[in-house]
Amino acid sequence: MGYPSNRPGHSHSDDPLAGIETTEDFERFSQRNDVFSRAIWDDKVRSKHTDSFFASYGMDATPRRGDGFTQRDFALRNASWLISDVMTNRHADQGRREGFQAPISYDTPVAPVQVEIDDPDAMAQEIKRISKFFGADLCGITDLDERWLYASRVDTRDMSKTDLGLPDGLPHVIVLGHEMDADLVATYPSALAGAATGREYSHEASVVMQLAAYIRNLGYEAVASMNDTGLVIPFAIKAGLGEYARNQLVITPEFGPRLRFSKIFTNLPLTHDAPRPRRVSAFCDICSKCADACPPKALPFGFPETGGTNRSAIKGVRKWTSDAEKCFGFWAKTRTDCAICMRVCPFNRDFTQARHRLWLKLALSPLRKFALWLDRNRGKRSKPADWWQKAP
């Protein structure tokens, strides 16, 4: 969701601090229309490649087409997803693909006695500390903005719409960020690179479930959530973790776009973080490296617009919007996820290094064109075979 600016055609934002611009045509998104759900029920998305794509995650259809797509590469990718898959599939017989198309079930009850919280700000700091103890890399807290909840979730037994299953009275959203491995991301597109995605889904499943259990042990409700229940990107922006970019990713000052996100809905008394607009969108206005590099040309050029090209786009939100059908079509053909847009993003840097922090200052300043010029030779793909040769 791009931040307000003097771009051509800019309209008033109803929530300018969060950089979220909705119009009178806004509609909450039905999860049945996300492209992964549509790959099951919609013939416009299903193709001869779709079944092989899903089968490859069970090692049933693993193409062996050279560097980055060998059986070893698929083996590592699929192993990285294991913990997430075990959690996700445990209630499949109930039509619940938890963490993706249904919230994660309680594994511990809410304690009958509540710990008294006198200082919501101190409690928020405690939650951030505990989140890092369990392994989260970032943590922010915001309010439950119902615009970003799905209008309905999916019963995976027949792909029908059903109730979200989110209890009432949970006014706070804890958003957690999980860093993806930079060396693996550098090998996109490849099945090997998909291990960076799978590892973080497995990590975040553990982290979000443990943090939710901690909150329930304090006597408060806590619903652990990954890709289910609501759109995590608007919540991450509102929680101050980063800004929306042309590549459809959240750019953070700590890790650039190299993150996955999870969330917890809770009634634990907490203060909220403020969004941190730093003009990432102004840089994206002059940069199109992600759109240039996208093989199926699924990413947009130009300025943010309202709406999208197909039913997998949310209605009534002014932002950069990808063509999800083209994007998933490329995934299906390669039998793995693609994040070339993450790899080539100029913000994909190691910000623990002083030279990259200096570049970030330039990129977020009026000298952003110079920062873009400095980035001209970065983002090239690393050979997956070289990753395997690295010393342990």
Image: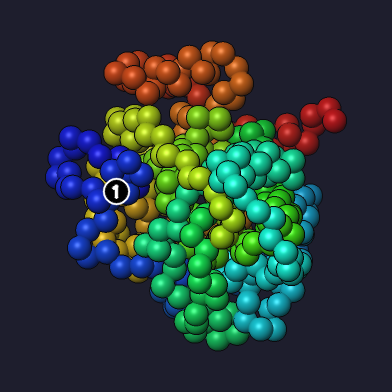
In this rendering, would 267 be left or right of 86? left
| Residue sitting nearer the eye, 295 or 54 | 54
| Tag count | 1
Locate residue 79, reporting x and y percent.
78, 55
In this rendering, would 335 be left or right of 115? left
Q: Which residue is mark 1?
A: 15
In this rendering, would 141 be left or right of 131? left
Q: Amino acid at mark 1?
A: Asp
Inspect this view and state whether residue 176 appears.
no
Q: Secondary structure at mark 1?
A: loop
On screen, 226 above or below 253?
A: below
Q: Quarter of the image for the C terminus: give it.
A: top right
On screen, 129 above or below 148?
A: above
Locate residue 282, reporting x and y percent.
30, 31
Give the quarter of the image for residue 137.
top right
Locate residue 208, reporting x and y percent.
67, 54
Identify the residue at horizontal 55%, vertical 86% (top origin): 158
Name the image colouring.
rainbow
Identify the residue at horizontal 37%, vertical 57% (top origin): 323
| Residue sitting nearer the eye, 19 or 316 | 19
In this rendering, would 13 be left or right of 125? left
On screen, 18 above or below 84?
A: above
Give the quarter of the image for residue 360.
top left
Give the quarter of the image for residue 150.
bottom left
On screen, 286 above or below 316?
A: above
Identify the residue at horizontal 33%, vertical 35% (top origin): 281
